[in-house]
Amino acid sequence: MTRSPLLLAALALGACAGKPAIEPVPAPPPPASYAAAVLAPDALAPELPTAAVLAVPAPVGPLAEPIEAAAGSEAQPLPDTGPPLARVAAANRSAVREPSREGYLNAVQVYDWADGALYRLYTAPERVSEIALQPGETLVSVAAGDTVRWVIGDTTSGAGASRRSHILVKPTAAGLRTNLVVATDRRVYHISLESSAGSAMASISWAYPQDALLVVNRAETMQAAPAVPAPEGPDLEALNFAYTIEGDEPSWRPLRAFDDGSQVFIEFPVRLAQDEAPPLFVSGEGGRPELVNYRVRGRYYVVDRLFAAAELRLGERRQQIVRILAGGAPGRRGSIR
C-alpha cells in the first residue's frame, strides 16, 4: 500500500505536537579567577549602607579658606622681591630734576626746591659752574664724591641779610660723573654733577615755594592777631643814677649805670658789639666776686637784681677791671670817672 506524501507529513506533525518541548541547557559558568578575586577591591571591602552619610567638618585655622577683606579696606601691597640695587637705581632716577626751558632766568636754571630731590648740573672742562644758595643762608659743609678730578670751592657775595653763599664747580675732563652734598643752616642739597665736551650750565639756584607760603601765612596771622599794647617803660622819675664807675679805661668801659628799683641797667659804648663783652661779677659774702644773672639788650646789660658793688673783668694774665659802685655820688645822678 502506498501512502501519499501529504499524509506522511501530517502524521509527523501530529507526533511532534504530542511530546513536551525540550528546554535548552544553560552554558556552564567560566572558571573562577583567583587573581581577579584577590585584586578586586569590591571582593574584600564590606558593603556599607547606602543611606549612611558621613559629615565632614569644615576646616579651620590655617586650612580654612581666606576671608574676603571687608568693604572699604585697602589691600596690602605685595612685597617687593626685586634686587635692592635695582630699587635704589629706580628711586634715584625718579628723584632727578633735569634743567627745563621754562626754568631758565637768563643763564641761571632755577629749580623748585623739594626735599630729597637730585638736581642735575651739567659742566664742561675749562668752564666754572656756579651753585647759588638762598640769600641769608649760611654754608656749613660741602662734600663731593670725587675730589681728585673735580675742583670745588666756595665764596660769598653781598653783606648783612643779602649775604649769599656760592659754590664753584669745575671738572678736569669730560665724561665724569659724581655727586655733591651741600649742607647749610636751613637744608641739605643733593646735586648730580656730569661733565661733557659740550655746553656747560653757568649757574643753578632754587625757588622756595614753602618759604613764600610761610611768609604769606605769617602776614595773615599778624593781620588777624589783635594788637598787643607796647609794654610800658620804666618811670623816668623813679630812676636812680647814683652809681660810680671806676677802674681801668678799656674801650668797652661803661658810660653809666642806673636802676629802676628792681633792675640795674649798665650802658656801654656803641662799639661793644665789635669788642669782646666782659663778664659781670657782683660782690658776694666776704667781698668775693660772684657771677650774676644778666642779659644783653642792645648796648645795655640788664641785671635782674640790685647790688652794692660789681666788677667787669676781661683778660687772663693782665685783666682789665672796671668797678661799679652803688650810691657812690650824691643826688640822683652818678659821676663817670
Image (spheres, rainbow, N blue to C red):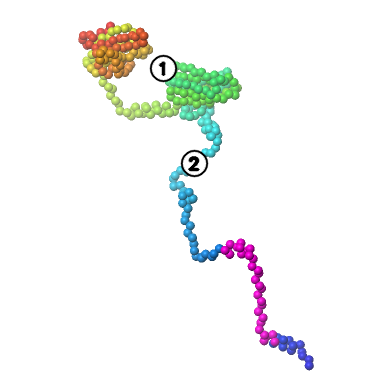
When asked about the image quadrant of residue 176, the answer is top right
Q: Position of residue 330 (x, y in %)?
A: 21, 9
Q: Farthest residue in the bottom direction? A: 1
SS at badge 1: helix
Residue 77 is marked as: 2
Tag 1: residue type?
A: Gly
**Could you say which is closer to the camera, residue 330 or residue 126?**
330
Left-right relation of 120 to 273: right
* Residue occupied by mark 1: 160
Measuring 54% from the left and 65% from the top, which residue is drawn there? 47
* Magenta stretch bounds: 15-44
Q: Residues within 10 Å of mark 2 (few under 14, many from 20)?
A: few
Q: Is residue 120 magenta?
A: no
Left-right relation of 253 to 214: left
Residue 26 is marked as: none
When asked about the image quadrant of residue 324, the answer is top left
Residue 241 seen in this snapshot: no
Q: Report the quarter where the N terminus lies.
A: bottom right
SS at badge 2: loop
When asked about the image quadrant of residue 239, the answer is top left
Tag 2: residue type?
A: Pro
Measuring 28% from the left and 6% from the top, which residue is drawn there? 337
Q: Position of residue 136 (x, y in %)?
A: 43, 20
Gap in Å between the C-alphas at discs 2 and 1? 52 Å
Left-right relation of 334 to 22: left
